[in-house]
Amino acid sequence: MIRQPAVANQFYDGDPVRLKMDIERMTGGRRGKQPCTAVVAPHAGYVYSGSVAGAAFARAIIPETVIIMGPNHTGYGSPAAVMPDGTWSMPMGDVPVASDIASALVNTSAYLEADYQAHMYEHSLEVQVPFLQYFQPALEIVPICLGHMPYAACQEIATAVAGAIKNAGRPVLMVASTDMTHYESQAQANAKDRLAIEQVLEMNPEGLYETVSANGISMCGFIPTTVTLAASLLLGASRAELVQYATSGDVSGDYNRVVGYASFIIS
């Protein structure tokens, strides 16, 4: 199975030379020296959220193996879909799926299923890959698309992910892909996003899940972020740091209907 890019030349430049130059600009050309358990990064078009994502990736050491968890925007495929094998064809080069970890996840979790369809047109994972490739040319990934599910399912998946990382025999980074509040005013987005950000900083996955649900926060990747926080705790992480926050209004100048973007380092 070869997955072709779904949003090249839309969310990011499809030309590898220009794409690398864009990433160098968005990361300041820095090379991360900070070991971490996870990165949380946005997934909008690079013109809007690339600098927020880049600020976090520039801080982190990126190992060869990365589990990327993102929301399912398309509705295709399984509600908890792991791409089990194959290759992602990307502008900066092919990226193989780490099939050993993918298989371990599917075999361990009652919720995760081997599924290609959910990944074919989904952008939330794809936009993270060029950043990861820039810092780690030998990259392999485990793509996971997650739809809405109860908190108990998030915890079960987190347990499977943490177990697979512990048994991998090599360093594995988690990346959670999410945007924050969608299409509200700057003031409303800032207020709602602050509530969710506080729960991430407190390393409280259940608190994040409940806060987003209770306050109607349109954080599209709160399920992947919840799973990542819970798995990070199981792996011994104890600290989350907000690297950068911005909104689309900071680029467009339209503060009446913005989308919020936040990036974090978890260690």
Image (cartoon, rainbow, N blue to C red):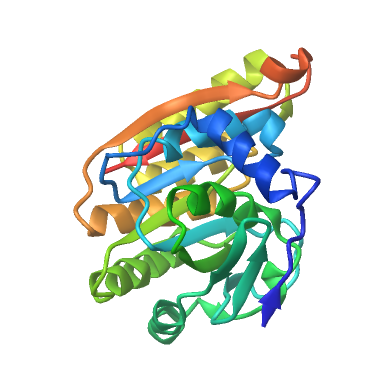
Identify which residue, 21 or 221, lies in the foreground: 21
Image quadrant holding the C terminus, namely: top left
Residue 87: x and y, percent? 60, 75
Q: Quadrant of residue 98?
A: bottom left
Residue shown at 26% from the left, 53% from the top: 233
Q: Residue at x 50, y 59 (%)?
A: 68
> Quick check: can you spot residue 236?
yes
Residue sitting nearer the eye, 261 or 153: 261
Please tell me how many numbered marks the rendered image carries. 0
In the displayed structure, 23 sits above or below 233; it is: above
Residue at x-position 67% and y-position 36% = 46
* Residue 248 position (above or below residue 35): above
Closest to the observer, 151 or 242 = 242
Residue occupying image coordinates x 35% and y 42%: 60
Across and down, in percent, residue 229 comes to 36, 50
Residue 147 seen from this side: no
